[in-house]
Image (spheres, coloured by chain):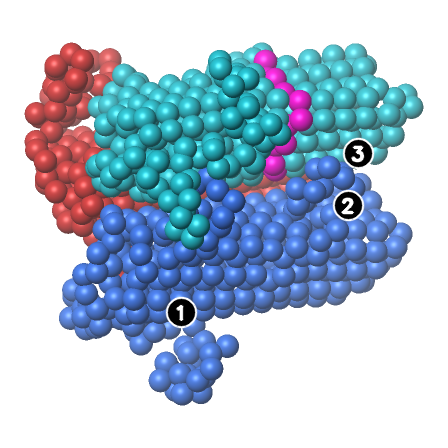
Chain colours: A red, B blue, C cyan
Amino acid sequence: MSYSMGKNVYIAESAVIAEDTKIGNNVQIGENVIIKSGVVIRDNVIIGEECVIAENVYIDLGVIIRDNVTIGKNTFIGARCIIGEYLVEFIQERDKQKHKTVIGENSLLRSETIIYGENNFGHDLQTGHRVTIRENSRIGHNVRIGTLSDIQGNCDIGNYVNMHSNVHIGQKSVVKDYVWIFPYVVLTNDPNPPSEELLGVTVEEYAVIATGTVVLPGQVIKSDALVGAGAIVNKNVEEETVVVGNPIRKIGDVKNIKNKVTGEAVYPWRYHFDRGMPWKEVGIEQWESENKVQD
Amino acid sequence: MSYSMGKNVYIAESAVIAEDTKIGNNVQIGENVIIKSGVVIRDNVIIGEECVIAENVYIDLGVIIRDNVTIGKNTFIGARCIIGEYLVEFIQERDKQKHKTVIGENSLLRSETIIYGENNFGHDLQTGHRVTIRENSRIGHNVRIGTLSDIQGNCDIGNYVNMHSNVHIGQKSVVKDYVWIFPYVVLTNDPNPPSEELLGVTVEEYAVIATGTVVLPGQVIKSDALVGAGAIVNKNVEEETVVVGNPIRKIGDVKNIKNKVTGEAVYPWRYHFDRGMPWKEVGIEQWESENKVQD
Amino acid sequence: MSYSMGKNVYIAESAVIAEDTKIGNNVQIGENVIIKSGVVIRDNVIIGEECVIAENVYIDLGVIIRDNVTIGKNTFIGARCIIGEYLVEFIQERDKQKHKTVIGENSLLRSETIIYGENNFGHDLQTGHRVTIRENSRIGHNVRIGTLSDIQGNCDIGNYVNMHSNVHIGQKSVVKDYVWIFPYVVLTNDPNPPSEELLGVTVEEYAVIATGTVVLPGQVIKSDALVGAGAIVNKNVEEETVVVGNPIRKIGDVKNIKNKVTGEAVYPWRYHFDRGMPWKEVGIEQWESENKVQD
């Protein structure tokens, strides 16, 4: 073995490790793991069985990767993340984690993120610290999920979705592309709590939900809508409308909101903001004309 | 010693370990620890002094168990939990953790739960990830506490209480049996913040508090009441009443709420829901007739 | 080397370690680290390069200290804290953490606190569990930050500020001395979300913000004001006024609030409360006369 290796490293014989891998102290690598070129694995990392770590992945101190996890190339996994976390069935079986977990390439998982097994995420995912993502969360590409956010699983999140810190996405939520969700927003799902009937929230493309809003079960926030901070959303919100309050009331059309300093219109936001968005290079008009059917 | 043991394991001579225990790598076990039959201790676990680990407990990767901790049989302790966490006095003394911590049998603590010393919990406790439970929290049996919830200590929580994600239970709160508390609910306690006078909230049997509600100090939510999402509870809530708003106003009787699809009544919820409840086998009517004085 | 040392300890030759240091098992200490007299370093701790650990610091199990970190004397660092966490540039460079991090003396960081590099904090800082403090957070002395709070960086926090659990301080916030912020309060900053224009909140001396309040971008809460629980602060709050509601309305003067039991006035709170405050010894009147210009 020609790769660089620390002390007290235990590698299963069936593991296949590229020559230029750097492995720290106290690392454990399980059966049938494949580690590709340029990977850095720092101290105290534990990698289970049947995992694939693609090129140039960086695995920081104390990360736990359970069984059946694939990490896409160039991804950075911050200290003490747990990837492929056990589903509840493991508690009974106490055997292996059988569900697959796939993290797309170019992702950045900040320290202490927990991602369950039975998940398959697109490329360019970013998480803040201590994010929890339960099983069966369908998440697209270029999604950002802020510190302490809690994705409860069985939900469907599109591409280029931005969730800020401490967002709670209940099961059966549907969040479409280019949605912004700000801190302490909760998407609920139980119309008659407690009940067995879960009715998810739907948030359509380009909608914005400001800080501290609670969306009640089954409500639909339509495209380009703006929900003001602290709203209790107890009915559907129509396209391009602004709602506020507990319970919500409509206060206008998003097109009438002006920047208080410049006096310019600010919504729909895609005509005024492009950081991290796919139209950054070409401009929104050209991008829209090229993408009649959005990705 | 006939038990299976990994590398770099340090076990105090006074520890007593059953023959069929499985111990991983880099494990440390302190003075006078007793480990019973069928226990699994995975890599990087640290167990302090004077602990008892009962039959068939599973201790996942990197768990820290401080001193004077007893874990009931069949309990599962997820990765990196800290059980018996130091009280503030330790900061000065920097010696041992002297307070006892008892986790009941058949419990499931999900990864990164922190439970302080000076706690004694009933059986069948379930925690989500990154739950924090401070000292002197009296918690009954069959209690579920969701991800990121923060139980501040000096509170009194009954049996079959369900707390969802990110619930904050202030000191001196009293939560009776069969209560449901949904995400981002806060039970406060300081009537004139900041002050030295703490006045806890009381939530009576079968009450339901929906997402994002703040209950002000000293308020009582009476049995079978329903508090709507985002409410600011600034006065007592009477039995079987529905309140909503900031501040709350009464909008009706729980018995008048119908399921929007089926048209059937849904409250009091115990007549319509039994998952995880003690009346699941016999039905609520028979169970009530057998349990005039509830457990 | 005469200090006490566990097994599997790796210390760089250039490190300078005082004779009475106690070092546990599986500890790693990097290049040019200086460890002073009376320090305790427990098992599984990793200390990077160029760090200084002053007298009598206690570093609990599994702490990660990155590069260029200075810890002031008598400070206690709870289990699994990460101090000097990587800024986002590290993700590209994957080299060393170059930004300095200074933790003042007599601080108490509870377990799993994450503090970024590029921070310089005053003495007597206290954090709860799982606090996250991003880079460029200017924090004074005698500050308390509760469990799960999230300080987003580029903010300015004074002395003797008390933040309870689960507080979110957005970038560009200014929080002056002696402010109290209760659980689930969010200070926001984006007037037209999403935008590139950040407009921080200002909270002036002695102001109190009760549980679950959201303060909208750019608003100023003036000195001695009291914001009631669950408020949505959409305009400035004047000195010594009480506001509540969504959106806020003024309901009176803080001087008219009486303790419901004793009938005594309770605000401005500094005349009625002194725990942890600098006027505790001499009384508020003498302290004020001696401190015309507050520290």
Q: Is residue A18 above or below residue B244?
A: above
Subunit bearing disc 1: B
Tell me the element at label 2: loop
Looking at the image, do the residues carrying marks 2 and 3 touch, with CB atoms under 8 Å apart? no
Residue at the location (44% across, 84% down)? Answer: B292
> Which of the two residues, B135 or C21, is positioned nearer the viewer here?
B135
Chain holding disc 2 = B
Type of residue at label 3? Gly
Say few, some or many: other residues with alpha carbon within 10 Å of mark 2 (under 14 / 14 to 19 / 20 or more). Answer: few
Image point (24%, 39%), residue name: C251
* In-image side of B204 versus A88 (left or right): left
Q: Decide if residue B89 is in sight here.
A: yes
Residue beneath disc 3: C24
Could you say where residue C114 lies in the image, as x and y percent from the top left?
55, 29
- Determine the CA span between mark 2 and mark 3: 15 Å
With A256 as the anchor, is B2 left or right in this view? right
- Give left or right: position of C124 versus B190: right
- Image coordinates of residue C157 in percent, x first then y, are 46, 21
Disc 1 marks which residue? B205
Between disc 3 and disc 1, the foreground one is 1
Q: Position of residue C265 (x, y in %)?
A: 40, 41
Q: In which quadrant will I find the N terminus of chain B?
A: bottom right
Q: Amino acid at mark 2?
A: Lys
Residue C213 is a magenta residue? no
